[in-house]
Image (cartoon, rainbow, N blue to C red):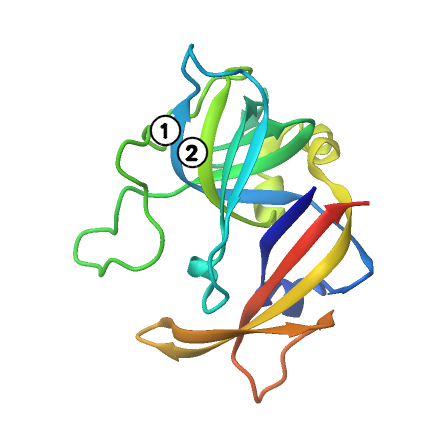
Amino acid sequence: MLWRDVFVPDSVVGSDGFTAEVGGLVEMPLALYCRYRTPVGKDDDGRPTVTFTPGDHALPDNRGVYDLVGRPVAMENTAWAAGWMLDVDGLGIYVSEAAAGPSPGFPRLGVYRETGSDPAAPVPQPGMWTRVRGQLSIAEPYETGAYEPEAELLRHAVRTWLVHRVVRLDGLPGSGRVTRGRGEDVAVVQRAGAARTTVGYLLDLEQA
């Protein structure tokens, strides 16, 4: 299957040396920023499912959203309480949880939890069928290194992917964040030059 709109921040490209090209292979784990989570009800089928709702390519927050059903993986969290891994048909996806809203005195910017969601913590119990909704990105080392057993979890999550599409997201900064942007299909993920304000890249990936 095709995993669409997987976000790779420009910081990963610039600092970590990440690169990819259309038609080439890339090895990486996936992460989901969860805006909605609920247990799968007794009347629902306990089976992995993947549903994608397309967005647009203006800004990272506007990209497509996934609804996933899977089961949490047993792990020890060594960094923060609201992080875990979801197994979806054998693929481990690192999950971080969106906040309910902005801190007092701050504007409402970004993605927050949806009405009706379970709270960010505690995280669901291992093995319990769970439905989540959110957007996908590359799982960065600060995320993958926050759980034990780290090496075993990475084996569960890292896959070799065939890159079907690359969209570069360019934007104009304002008030501390990018407020306007556009997406452009490109052949290669590469570090942005000084003439561009590149926010990151969206990849369409198929397991090789």
Question: The residue tagged with tag 2: helix, strand or loop?
Answer: loop
Looking at the image, residue 115 lies above or below residue 38? below
Which label's residue is closer to the chain start, 2 or 1?
2
185 and 193: which is toward the camera: 185
Mark 2 highlights which residue? Answer: 82
Looking at the image, residue 46 sits to the left or right of residue 190; the answer is left
Give residue 80's position: percent from left, percent from top. Answer: 45, 36
Q: Residue lying at the far bottom in this picture: please name it.
A: 195
Query: SS of the residue at dot 1?
Result: loop
How far across and down, in percent of the image, does residue 8 sit?
60, 59
Label ID, residue 121: 1
Tag 2: amino acid: Ala
Q: On the image, which quarter does residue 49 sit in?
A: top right
Name above or below for residue 183 compared with residue 126: below
Judge left or right: residue 8 versus residue 79.
Answer: right
Q: Which quarter shows the C terminus?
A: top right
Q: Which mark is residue 208?
A: none
Q: Is residue 85 left or right of residue 2?
A: left
Q: Quadrant of residue 90?
A: top right
Amino acid type, mark 1? Ala
